[in-house]
Amino acid sequence: MRETNFLVENNARHLWHPMAHPAEMRANPPKIVNAAAGVEITDLQGKTVLDAVGGLWNVNLGYSCEPVKAAIRDQLDQLPYYSTFRGTTNSPLIELSYELAEWFREDGLTRAFFTSGGSDSVETCLRLARQYHKINGQPERTKFIALKKGYHGTHFGGASVNGNANFRRNYEPLLPGVTHLASPYLYRNPFGTEDPATLASLIAKQFEDEIAFQGADTIAALIMEPVLGAGGVIVPHETFMPLMRDICDRHGILLIADEVITAFGRTGAWTGSRLWGVRPDFMSTAKAITNGYFPFGAVMIADRIAEAFEANKNSFGAIGHGYTYSGHPVGAAAALATLKETRRADVATNAAARGLELVAGLQGLKAKHEIIGDVRGKGLMCALELVADRNTKASAAKDVVATIYEGTYDAGVMVRTSGANIILSPPLIITATDVERIVAALDAGLAKVAR
C-alpha cells in the first residue's frame, strides 16, 4: 500500500462516495479506516475507536471472526468462482440453501434466491411478487404499497418504494404504481396522536382506504421493514406488522419483509418478522449474512409462493432474473461460517440485553441534554433525534450534528449521522462495558454543543 501522505492527498479526489455529495467529500475528505479488530476500527493516523456503526449495520460478529475469514480463504483455494445460471451450481451453495431453509423455517420460508446484496434482494422480491400474480392468472396486480421513511435500497425498484425524498428526487420519474402510507413514526406523525397503538390502527385504516381506492386486484405487494432502519430507527407498535399482514391476507396482497438490516439477530430476535409474530411471503436479506466480509444476499421465499412457481407448467414460472454473482461460492462459504458462528454466539440474546442497556443510557443522555428530542431503539438498532427546540421539534442544524459527530469520535466512538439523527448499530457481540463507552462518548460529543 502507498504511503500515508499519498492516501491523504488523494482522498476523495478520484472516486465518488455513495450517499454523499462529491463536492462536499472533496472539501471535507472522509476518515480513512485502515484496520479493525474485535469491535474497534483504527484510522490512518492510528486512532482506535469503538465502531458503533457496525460497518453499515452488517458486521454483527465484529472484525476478528476467524471462522468466516478462514472459510473465505479456503474457498478461494478450492473454487473462487463459477456461475449458477441454469446448468451449473456449487457445493457450498447447496449446503447454504439447506441451512437457510432450516434457519428460516419458523418464518415459513424454505426457498432461497441468491443475490449480491440488499438492493439486489429487494429488486428480486419486487419482481417475483409480480411474477407470482401472473402465474396465478392476475396479471393486473402490478402495484406496490410502501411506507414513508422506509428504505429499500438503490435500484430503480427499490428507490421507487423508498419513502425518503433524499433517495428519490434526483432520480425521478421512478417506477409508476407505487403508493406510500404514513410511517409508524410516533415522534412526528400526521395524525397528531401520541399513542403508538392508535397510530398503528390509523395507518392500517389508511391502508384499507388505499386498497379500496386502487382496487385490491391491482396491488401486488406491501413492502415494509419490521423496524425502519435508515429512516431513523422507527420502531412500530407490536400490533402494526400483524395488522398489515392481516389486511394483506384479506385482499390477496403479498407481504415483503425487507430484513436486510433486521435478519440474523439485530432486533433481539432472529428476524424482525419473528419479533412481531408475522410470516411474510418474501424476505430480503443481505448485510450480516456474511458478517460484511463478502457482498452477498438471499431472498427467502414462503412455501405457498414456492409451490405456485414449482407447479407451474408454462413460461410464467421461468425465472428471467439473476446476477453474475448470484450464489457466488466464496460468498456461500462465508455465509455458512457466519450462520454457524452467529448461532454459536447467540448474538440475538446479547443484542436484546445490550439494547436495553443502550436505550437506558440514551434516555439518561436525553434527561441531561436538551438537544435530544427523541430516543428510539429495539435491540442493537438505536437512534437519537436532535432538535433545536424541544417544543417545536425543529431539527438541529447540520453543523451542530457534525460537531457532535466529531466530538463523539474524538472521545473514542464512531457513530453515524443521518439528517438530524445519530444512528447506532454496533456489532452484536458488544459487552456492557462497550455500551458504557458508547454512552460516555456521546455525552462528550453532546457537551460540545451544550447550551
Image (cartoon, rainbow, N blue to C red):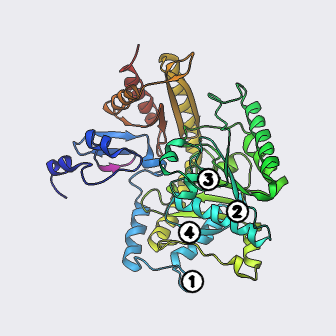
* Residue 418 in the image, given as x and y percentages of width and height: 46, 37
Q: CA distance from mark 4 to mark 1?
A: 13 Å
Q: Which mark is residue 258?
A: 3
Per the image, the residue denoted by label 1 is 86
Q: Going from the N terminus, do you reach mark 2 or mark 3 first?
A: 2
The amino acid type of the residue labelled 2 equals Arg
Per the image, the residue denoted by label 2 is 105
Magenta highlight range: 34-38
Per the image, the residue denoted by label 4 is 114
Q: Main secondary structure of the magenta part?
A: strand
Instruction: Give the class, few, some or many, for how many residues have Cα within 10 Å of label 3's Cα (few <14, many ≥20).
Output: many
Q: CA distance from mark 1 to mark 2?
A: 26 Å
Mark 1 or 2, which is nearer the eye? 1
Q: Going from the N terminus, do you reach mark 4 or mark 2 first?
A: 2
Q: CA distance from mark 4 to mark 2?
A: 17 Å
Above or below, comparing residue 56 to residue 283 in the picture: above
The amino acid type of the residue labelled 3 equals Asp
* Residue 350 in the image, given as x and y percentages of width and height: 55, 43
Mark 2 or 3, which is nearer the eye? 3
Classify residue 103 by image quadrant.
Answer: bottom right
Q: Quarter holding the N terminus?
A: bottom left
The amino acid type of the residue labelled 1 equals Arg
Q: CA distance from mark 2 to mark 3?
A: 17 Å
